Amino acid sequence: MKISVIGVGYLGATHAICMASLGHEVIAVDVDPQKVALLNTGVVPFYEPGLTQLLGTANAQSNLTFTTDYSDASNCDIHFLCIGTPQTENELHADLTALENAFESVIKIAKPGSLIVGKSTVPVGTAQRLATNLAERKPGVLLNWNPEFLREGHAIADTLQPNRIVIGANTENGAEALANFYKLVSPEAPIFITNFPTAELVKVAANAFLATKISFINAMSEVADATGADVTLLADAIGADDRIGRKFLGSGIGFGGGCLPKDIRAFLARADELGLAESLNFLKEFDLINQRARTRAVALALKELGNPKGKKIAVLGAAFKPDSDDVRDSPALEIAETLHALGASVVVHDPRALESAAAKIPELTYSDSIEETLTQADLTMHLTEWGEYRALDPALVKKLVKVPTIFDGRNVLDVAKWQNAGWKLLALGRAL
Ligand code: UGA
């Protein structure tokens, strides 16, 4: 099938490359000529495991074209809108400007009988508004809303073997064509066909629920700090109940990234517009708990160091999570930035995110050598749980640092191993 993918960020580039690898003819359109040029030379402009290799395969190379010209996509049967909806500056709601512009451009070139599929995360009510606009302007072109659940770091698997497919449609805009398309992509995945608002809400509700789980366990971490309990054992024990589950009960410095934080805020803003502020008020608290996890980490570092001026802090990790170079709303980077602003001499290491971190916070010192980062450190802070940090040999690392004290901001290091090697381990919500 001939399809277009509009927007080649994390979601769009992954969708375009995966669909081309399955044999679809894909025209990927983006307004950023630099991104388009890079992708046309086989370079993915961000780090996602396996994606560059998949782009290099014969199928992707022969089926995929990146362009800045929307008219190249005029012959396509399906147009997938994969445009970011970031948080509006200094406000809670999502900024739909880029999405609306892309939608306008697609309306102009879409041929009769084609289908526009919104994959972007949008406030509930958006799809119906766009569908009404479309019906007036280009009758015969249909709209579906098909939220995306891919996780950075697992984007290929989540696209090719999704755990569910949700298609928002209405009487005029049937779901059959898109359901048939996805049956070929992933015959196993259950398909939920819903109305527009349900599809929009599934996405934000899923992210709100994940954020809730993380903030819930970080609230328990605050209680554990005050009472001498251990939050990781508490998570293991409550998570053993499969009605609760252990996933997303990882306590520590909390969630970040381009999705969870902005999605719960946009959900709050939309609830307010709908007169439902009370219904979602709990998300405000969970956002605050999440912010507090970062300030608790800074406070712990300061308690340990005393006056931070002139003290070297080795920060392991800048990305908002491992297997990604994304530093949007990264707890690790915010903690590093705060400690730097307080006068500490902070050196940040990350296996993949140094470039994006330096572009965002240029005033920090970055190093691509773990050894250099740790040398003579007064405090080591493990803030993003990359596999290589977990694999460090505490006895060897101890020889590099000035003071063998490590803060495990993700509660994943092997406590006994580090303590037996002579380290003092610090953590949130744990009596170590
Ligand atoms: C999230 C959702 O998991 C995806 O399903 C969704 O499609 C995506 O947002 C999106 O809306 O596009 P992602 O942002 O890639 O995916 O990251 P997550 O794996 O959800 O992690 C988010 C943050 O929570 C990270 O900072 C991570 O370190 C943190 N986290 C995760 C915890 O602090 N504790 C945990 O137990 C799990």
Image (spheres, rainbow, N blue to C red):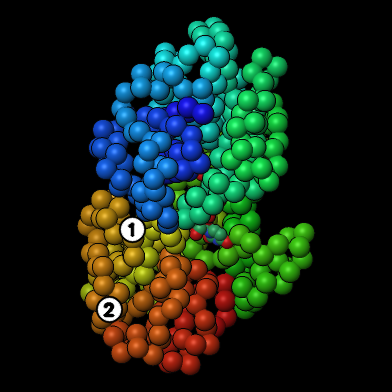
In this view, 193 is above or below 348: above
Name which residue type carries label 1. Answer: Ala
Q: Residue at x 62, y 43 (%)?
A: 186
Q: Quadrant of the C terminus?
A: bottom right
In this view, 385 is above or below 6: below
- The CA span between labels 2 and 1 is 17 Å
Instruction: Give the image location of residue 161, x and y in percent.
Output: 59, 48
In this view, 207 is above or below 416: above
Left or right: residue 160 compared with residue 340: right
| Residues packed near mark 1 inside 10 Å, few (<14), some (14 to 19) or many (20 plus) | many
Left or right: residue 308 compared with residue 104: left
Which residue is disc 1 drawn over? Answer: 353
Instruction: Give the image location of residue 406, x and y in percent.
Output: 41, 79
Viewer-proximal residue among 255 and 38 = 38
Report if residue 422 is visible in the image: yes
Name which residue type carries label 2. Answer: Glu
Instruction: Give the image location of residue 39, x and y in percent.
Output: 31, 41
Q: Residue at x 46, y 16 (%)?
A: 110
What is the quadrant of residue 248 in the picture? Answer: bottom right
Instruction: Give the image location of residue 47, x and y in percent.
Output: 37, 53
Which residue is disc 2 drawn over? Answer: 371
Report the number of numbered marks: 2
Viewer-proximal residue among 97 and 137 = 137
Say what secondary structure mark 1 lies in: loop
